[in-house]
Image: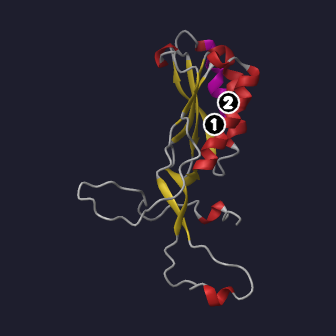
Amino acid sequence: MARRPWHCYKTHKRPAYQKKRSRSHRKEYVRGGPDSVLRMYDTGNRKRPLDEWELSLGVIVLKNVQLSHRTLEAIRTSLNRNLQKKLTREAYLIRIRPHPWQMIRENKMMAFAGADRLQSGMRNSFGRVMGRAARVYAGQTIVEVFCNFVNKGIVIKSLKTAAYKIGAKNRVVVLKMKNPEEHATKVGVMIALEN
């Protein structure tokens, strides 16, 4: 059966629907469902301490949106592939920030002759868990890449390519910069990002 289009789940207005483990062991509605496709949140040079990186670039979202676990994995793989081709694995660190805790339900409908006799339509239409999503709010960072000033151009291009997969308005920004006084001439990164 084909997957339901993501625009059905893109916005979030209601309270979060997550799997909970309470002390009272009260039964929750959330049961089962597939695990997240996204397994690795950090990719690249994980051994190097974060304070040693000169620059941190990231993608922020400009409005509230839900991102599926498949979207987050697609962002990570496309970024990693692009950066691995152009740089070595020791030259960057990718971090996916949001975690997909939100459960996505779907009330499956049959679509064949005589289906109306077998299914109950919208009666008992709570649905089953079909996937997971991350709730992201306006201004929140989705992905962060640590690198050195030498590689900033390559990283910015790769981030812009990966940002197309988000499906909502976003922007590539400079999150942190080591010793901005030293790199006063290199702050052209800021101007390049605005254009």
| Magenta-span inclusion, residue 5 | no
Q: What amino acid is labelled 2 in the image?
A: Asn
Indicate the quadrant where residue 96 lies.
top right
Q: Which residues are magenta?
A: 185-195
C-alpha gap between disc 2 and disc 1: 6 Å
Tag shown at residue 76? 1
* Nearer to the camera, 141 or 134: 134
User: Taking 115 as reference, is 190 above or below it?
Assistant: above
Q: How many marks?
A: 2
* Nearer to the camera, 167 or 49: 49
| 59 sits left or right of 32 in the view | right
Q: In the rendered view of the protein, which quadrant contains the N terminus?
A: bottom right
Q: Is residue 195 visible?
A: no
Residue 148 percent location from the top left of the image: 61, 16
Q: Main secondary structure of the magenta part?
A: helix
Indicate the quadrant where residue 170 lies.
top right
Task: Report the residue marked by disc 2.
Answer: 80
Residue 109 percent location from the top left of the image: 63, 77
Q: What amino acid is labelled 1 in the image?
A: Arg
* Nearer to the camera, 124 or 73: 124
Residue at 67% x, 78% y: name it: 110
Determine whether the residue tagged by mark 1 lies in a helix, strand or loop: helix
| 167 sits left or right of 180 in the view | right
Indicate the quadrant where residue 162 lies.
top right
Residue at 52% x, 12% y: name it: 181
Residue located farthest toward the left when viewing the structure as drawn: 24
Residue at 46% x, 51% y: name it: 101
Q: In the rendered view of the protein, which quadrant contains the C terminus?
A: top right
Determine whether the residue tagged by mark 2 lies in a helix, strand or loop: helix
Residue 188 percent location from the top left of the image: 65, 21
Tag shown at residue 62? none
